Amino acid sequence: MPASRRSLLFALLFLIGLVACRREALPLFTPSPSLAPSPTTTLTATPAASPSAESPALLLALMEGDYIHLFVYDPQTSSLTRLTADPWDDMTPAVSPDGTRLAYASRRNGYWDLYLLSLTDGNITRVSDTLSYEGAPSWSSDGLWLVYEAYVDDNLELFVRSAVDGEQTPLRVTQDSFTDRSPVWAPPPHQQWVAFVSNRSGDDDIWIADLGRTGNERFFNVSRAPHSVEAHPAWSPDGRFLAWSSVSEETGMAGIYVWDSHTPDEPPRWAGSGHWPIWLDETHLAAFLAVPDGYFLTAYAWPDGRLTLPPVPVPGTPYGLTVLPRGLPQPVPDSFQRAAEWTPEPLYLSQISQDSDIPGGRAALVSLPDVQAPYPQLHDAVDEAFQALRRRVAEVAGWDALAALSNAFVPLTVPLEPGLSEDWLYTGRAFALNPLLLNAGWLVVGREDFGQQTFWRVYLRARAQDGSMGMPLRQVPWDIQARYNRDPAVYDQGGQWMQTTPPGYWIDLTALARAYGWERLPATANWRSYFQGARLGEFVMTQGLNWQAAMLQLYPPDIFVTPTVVIPPTRTPTRTPWRWLTPTPSLTPTPRPTFTPMP
């Protein structure tokens, strides 16, 4: 079974066990039995925009092919409806308090700017116009202002600007050396509060900025969780509760925690597993569940933590989640209908050659032109996928990161490092990035733990650092090179988290590779003391095969026959004595009577 399927099966069994331990988990939504979401069925976009009116729906930003698009998930019908289908990225949506407008970040002009989308007629209004990154908007309770994050001075800072007058100069909320991101404006009675993520305490914690105050007194920490990474705060509709996701730096476990503003000194309470929480109402939360190569959408009841929406796999990497309290207005705008009816073109077409010279109907190996590797070849079923990914990486990153590989196909006659005797490189279905990219600073990795397995999220530095490529890093990378700094504690843990987030714009290669069907491989159990076992940049396209089945596509079954050494029978050697002399008896004196003189 492939590593990704084992991890997915483990996650599903864990969730099923979690549900079984709860009492009478009543569903938040009541879809018909024939349309109930199944944990094994991946959501796919429907050909028509048909979310139910006046019923709550979830608004998602998902990577679909080469771009990030907006989707609406209707729990009543379990349908996923596409809202945007343009050749650019749209992400981090936020619905206005009256439910008629959508603020989001888009790269429709080549740079990340803020836009407003009318949900009633589909009209789009541009809010900002800069070359630097701007994203993650959030509405004030009166719908007149937006708070958002912007990349200035090699750092993420918070700004407030008018949502009705684009000519007004933005107001700066933070201006320091810390990274401040993911702001969310609180509803009444705390409409002067803005919750956000900041590393001003050392780790990524959840902070609140009181806009009614000035100076550093306006900031206070509400998570206060050392050795963990917090992200994605979200206010409940009544403004009482603040939820966020937290990942332990020691165990890698991800959970959702809730802070009660009525008892601010009490520690936050655990609400469930997941990332990117969002409040459906005052008593229910939705969130994403992450597995090594995918995501699920689920929901919990608050405060008892009952699972109220069965985990539903989503088809792409998420870049935003919010709620439409009353669903989409009816009738649906024509632009939404056209986007829903749009059919994405395949990212590549696989062509299998018919080579009669290969015995046994086995697959062929295809050479990779202009690729430097010890053996620049791949399996005939995956070479087009690699070339398509290579072209896309060169386009979005500005340089050909896949032109020089550490390995592509590896013949059986070439031994890999110890512990990698059954590596996917032998199947011709995997490739490994050149580790020199890590040394040169053009590649960083984020550590993601799932149970006892460690995976890596690979980021490539964009060649153009003017905001036209990539986006700022939101994940603190893992410094695997720190193991060589002569610190025994750091060596034992295989490195350490970087003290500061690297500046600049980066490409999420892991998410892009997943869109093209490539999965990342877990590190081996001894990666902390064995660099080759980390497998930092190795990707595989299994196509549902396990390692043995993939090997049989290239080799005969005889490769799995282990030769048994048979020792022929031989006569047991017996040593023959030589130079042996029979001893002769020695002379023994004969006793004789002695003369005794007479007296």
Image (cartoon, helix red, strand yellow):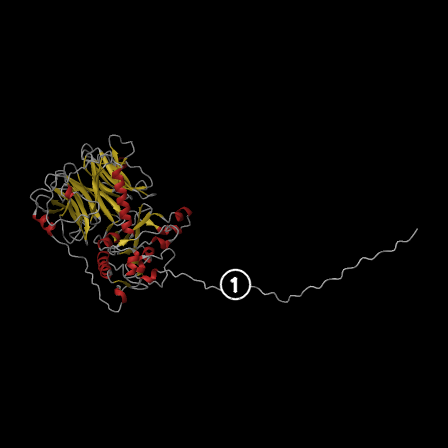
Q: Nearer the viewer, residue 549 or 391?
A: 549
Q: Is residue 506 visible?
A: no
Which secondary structure lies at badge 1?
loop
The residue at the point 14 percent across, 52 percent down is 86
The residue at the point 27 percent across, 67 percent down is 359
Q: In the figure, residue 593 lies in which quadrant?
A: bottom right
Q: Identify the residue at the far top of this view.
A: 262
Q: Nearer the viewer, residue 129 or 446?
A: 446
Horizontal side of 100 relative to 565 (left or right) equals left
Q: Is residue 452 above or below residue 563?
A: above
Q: Position of residue 21 (x, y in %)?
A: 27, 37
Question: Disc 1 designates what residue?
Answer: 572
Q: Nearer the viewer, residue 99 or 248?
A: 248
Q: Is residue 194 visible?
A: yes
Q: Is residue 29 above or below residue 85?
A: above
Q: Position of residue 311 (x, y in %)?
A: 22, 43
Q: Position of residue 188 (x, y in %)?
A: 18, 33
Horizontal side of 50 relative to 12 (left or right) equals left
Q: Identify the residue at the far bottom of this view.
A: 357
Disc 1 residue type (three-letter): Thr
Q: Identify the residue at the far right of this view.
A: 599
Q: In the figure, residue 427 lies in which quadrant?
A: bottom left
Q: Position of residue 126 (x, y in %)?
A: 13, 47
